[in-house]
Image: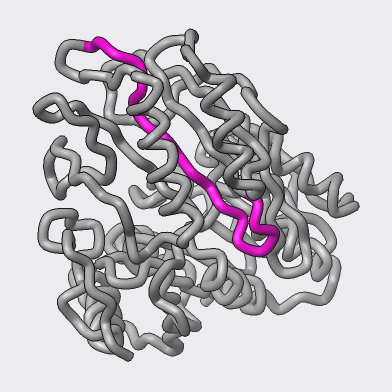
Amino acid sequence: MENKTCKLKDKCGACQLLHLTYPKTIEYKKKYVIDSFKNEGINVIIDKVIDAKSPYQYRNKMIIAFQNHKGKVISGFYEENSHKIIDLDNCIMHSDIQNKIANFIKKLIIDFHVSIYDEDRRTGLLRYVLIREAVHTKEVLITFVLSDDIFPSSKEIIRRITNEFKEVKAVIQNVNNRKTSIVLGDKEKVLYGRPYIEDELMGLKFKITSKSFYQVNPIQVEYLYKEAINSIKCKGDETVIDAYSGIGTIGLILSKNVGKVISVEQNRQAYLAAIQNAKDNNIRNVYFENDDATKFIKELENESIDYVIMDPPRTGSTPQFLNSVLKLSPRGVVYVSCDPQTLARDVKVLLKSYKIEHISIVDMFCFTKHIESVVVLNKK
């Protein structure tokens, strides 16, 4: 497989491994996982490696930042370790439709003289544009992140976007006037269509909102979830905790194989989307908790748990959560992770009572240094 060329790869920094052939990136990532465990004093073997059949144009979410630079509007991604934006008209990791929409919006922003936010002076309006694509249904959601409630010319801008791109089913206005590197603010309203798009995953439908966590590579995520779900030896009456559950994907897919799933998610928008996803798919044996995973599991009483599936953020879980898992003493733990270092750190705690049965790595983030891992642990 020949590498595609990216004229900005040395500046952007998002795809740190584009200088390698794709097979070499897999070797790099496999070693990264093994070395991360070795640094914690744990020797492991990677039992299964699932690489991507198509390592380009895989990303289903694009975050475009805007700046004024010498009187010119530029838009694109931040240069690595900086707040400097690289002016970008095409990214080989995003789909054609995402690139076309991004370029079209930039032209509209210039044509309608929409002011660009200056983070130093805290003046101007437009901060970011988020584009989310549902790969299986081809639906697109666009979120304009502004510093104020007032969006001049928004009706005409949206009319032109939706006339040009029939795939756009939702346009959201998000207000973020805080001095922060966090992209989205708390306040939102629907400018066009509905507040979500729908995608399909492993036979189920899922609603995706502007703030929903949804895996960035929709093709590889099916392999990832199969690795996690198939590792649970089900008789059909098990009770499973799905911690850090997002919009409920893993728990809802697993639900047909077990007796009961308790899904725990702190983000309220994702929690509400998960409830709706259960209703839409006519699933009645998944119970949803809008709570911090650590707080919930520490207070869990009178419940016999057979398995814990956990898919925490890059920072990993907490010692309190892990120690609570040890007290609950489920038959097994399935840990899904996007950071081998925090994964190894957390697994080391669980090894007090558990042993590693299987480790898989799934290349979700092609040509980056990141790798998704699934570690299956069973009681000693």
At a point 53% along the width and 23% down the height, the residue shown is: 173
Q: Is residue 247 above or below residue 356?
A: above
Q: Is residue 317 above or below residue 177?
A: below
Dividing the picture into quadrants, the one containing residue 26 is: bottom left
Q: Residue furthest front?
A: 111
Residue 298 visible from this viewpoint: no
Q: State yes or no: residue 74 in magenta.
A: no
Q: Nearer the viewer, residue 80 or 244?
A: 80
**Quarter placement of the N terminus:** bottom left
Q: What residue span does the magenta drawing correspond to?
A: 122-139
Dividing the picture into quadrants, the one containing residue 90 is: bottom left
Q: Nearer the viewer, residue 110 or 271?
A: 110
At a point 24% along the width and 64% down the height, the residue shown is: 15
- At which x and y percent is residue 349? 37, 60
Q: Is residue 214 above or below residue 159?
A: below
Residue 53 visible from this viewpoint: yes
Report the side of 67 relative to 270 (left or right): left
Q: Nearer the viewer, residue 311 or 37?
A: 311
Q: Nearer the viewer, residue 145 or 280?
A: 145
- At which x and y percent is residue 144? 47, 28
Q: State yes or no: residue 133 in magenta.
A: yes
Report the side of 341 relative to 293 (left or right): left
At a point 23% along the width and 85% down the height, the residue shown is: 21
- At which x and y percent is residue 316? 38, 51
Report the side of 216 relative to 93 (left or right): right
